[in-house]
Amino acid sequence: MKVTDQDVAYVADLANLDLTVDERAGMVRDLNSILEYIERLSELDTSDVEPMAQVSDRCGVDDSKQGSERFAYANRDDVLEGLRKSLSQEEALRNAPDADGTYFRVPKVIER
Amino acid sequence: MDSPSLTIDAARSAVQERSTTALALAEAHYARIQNEDERIGAFLTLCEERALEQADRIDRMAAEGKPLPPLGGVPVAIKDVMSTRGVRTTAGSKILGNYIPPFDCTAVARLEAAGAVVLGKTNCDEFAMGSSNENSAFHPVRNPRDLSRVPGGSSGGSAAAVAADMAVAALGSDTGGSIRQPASFCGVIGLMPTYGRVSRYGLIAFASSLDHIGPLTKTVKDAAIMLRTIAGRDPMDSTSANISVPDYAAELDQPLKSLRLGVAREYFGDGLDDEVRHAVESAIDELKSLGCEVVPVSLPHTPYAIPAYYLIATAEASSNLARYDGVRYSYRAPGVRSLSEMYRRSRDEGFGAEAKRRIMLGTYALSAGYYDAYYLKAQKVRTLLTRDFDEAFRKVDAIVTPTSPTAAFRLGEKSNDPLAMYLADIYTVTADLAGIPGISVPCGTTKESLPIGLQILGKHFDEATILRVAHAYEQAA
């Protein structure tokens, strides 16, 4: 068992989840089963391999340029309401679970 | 029109020639949803008002004798991970159960601009996380071909809606196989375009470097028409590519002669069901008789795709799902006394089991001490998998594989074993990781009459070739 109940509690805390006692037990079981399967990645020697975070730099970019300049086509002027008009205050608040017409309202922030 | 089993061109022509109206077509599809969907469960929300308004606009164009746009009057369904202005968009999750977006997803807006009539939003696994549609917070979807079976996932509602003629075509999203696998299970066409071909603006994010929007349709030609409509650069998504979009449908009939098709033995190993193997092998023989040359290729890192995928996808998901905090939108638990308790209880009550499992796995893989061993390692393996395809595509124009190792499984069969469920994606996750396009096209059925899917993978931005191969196979089969 790689992942313990303590690990699960720690990670749940990082992820802003509480999890019930039953959920934690299930999570210990599932994460261990998945990580055991994932362990096979260690069979591969990747010491000389570059990591790949995304595929967007492979096609359609300007290869005559360097770094982010290759994506110059995606740049635009930094202007107010350039591509899309900003939401009105009313629209922006419409989905809020609690709002007072001007602000989003949340419970007390400072805990004692 | 009792059974509206129509293709895009047939529907559009009928409206253009006034042998029916867009309104009548929409109403016929709503009637079918009314009759069929109680037992299938493909839809979460219907938007009749929006649909009938659009149908009326199209009918007025037709009445004035104006040429209709490519999807004029065509009833479509949209997976509920794509934002629709004023229409509830849940991502299959309780945490977004009441969310009404203030804007439209680009792909949806482009469909409507091309005349499509959006009927409603389709059911899916929560945040597109799943391979059976059983992770929907609302209700599962049943496979129209056999109601005891799953429709696949996560775009199970979209696949079922098209298979049961409740929509002419649908949009789905694919992060690890979520368009192609349900298409295979339900016996329809499912196309995942190249990463960057279709804007992700307005798609509720699961794993941003892997998420794709694409069509589910009854014919390959319909998939070609849908792709052309939604593809192309969008300034609202900086990862949408600056590459021109061909007229895919116009190129479908070019002969396959001397096209080189790769077959990789890594996709025909242990775990592949015999009936699926035979159906895919016969399909490859058929493609050979159509003039393709079959070339063996090797994709040696394939066995490492699932582990790499489930680290990268969950790591990205854990970041993307951090936004659901119960403040600006999303579910808030009642009776909370502090901010910290609000976050935790809202997320605990709002997310389902699989979403929590993936948030936990992703957070673990990114946490101090494990980042190098898991997340970084997976990103390096992603490079190796991509190189496999680069190497293979130097020798061939497309690669053919099974879409899924089995036909549709039974509801409940894998729902208690997350690892078994993840392995259902074994032939599809590789294309998402490499960013290449893939299509699933029906290639026969099992003895129990369950559909089997043939997957065709192509080079970056070469959807034209895989559509052409799929079309030739569909016409011949």
Image (cartoon, grey):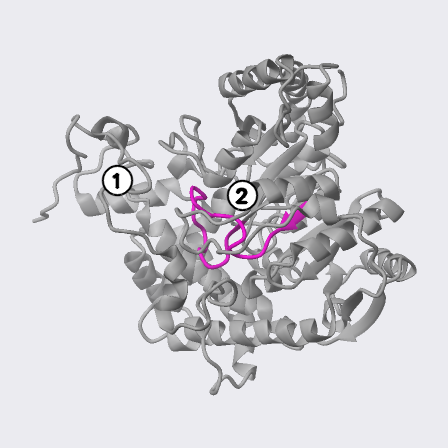
Camera sees residue A33: no
> Which mark, by number, is residue B39?
none
What percent of the width, then of the height, locates residue B193? Answer: 60, 52
Q: Which residues are magenta?
A: B190-212
> How many other residues sit within 10 Å of disc 1, few (<14), some (14-19) or many (≥20)?
few
What percent of the width, then of the height, locates residue B391? Answer: 65, 77
> Which mark, by number, is residue B125?
2
Camera sees residue B421: yes
Residue visible at 19% across and 34% down in the picture = A104
Residue A7 location, quadrant = bottom left
Secondary structure mostly taken by the magenta-highlighted segment of the chain:
loop
Hey, what amino acid is under mark 2?
A: Asp
What percent of the width, then of the height, locates residue B220? Answer: 74, 44
Hey, what amino acid is under mark 1?
A: Glu
Q: Is A59 covered by the magenta stretch?
A: no
Residue visible at 22% across and 42% down in the picture = A80
Q: In the image, is B341 to the left or to the right of B122?
A: left
What percent of the width, then of the height, locates residue A21? Answer: 37, 52
C-alpha span from label 2 to label 1: 35 Å
Query: Do circles 2 and 1 both sit on a common chain?
Result: no
Please state the chain letter of the residue tagged with numbered disc 1 in the rendered image: A
Residue visible at 35% across and 45% down in the picture = B348
* Disc 1 element: loop
Image quadrant containing the N terminus of chain B: top right
Q: Is B201 covered by the magenta stretch?
A: yes
Give the labeled residue for mark 1. A81
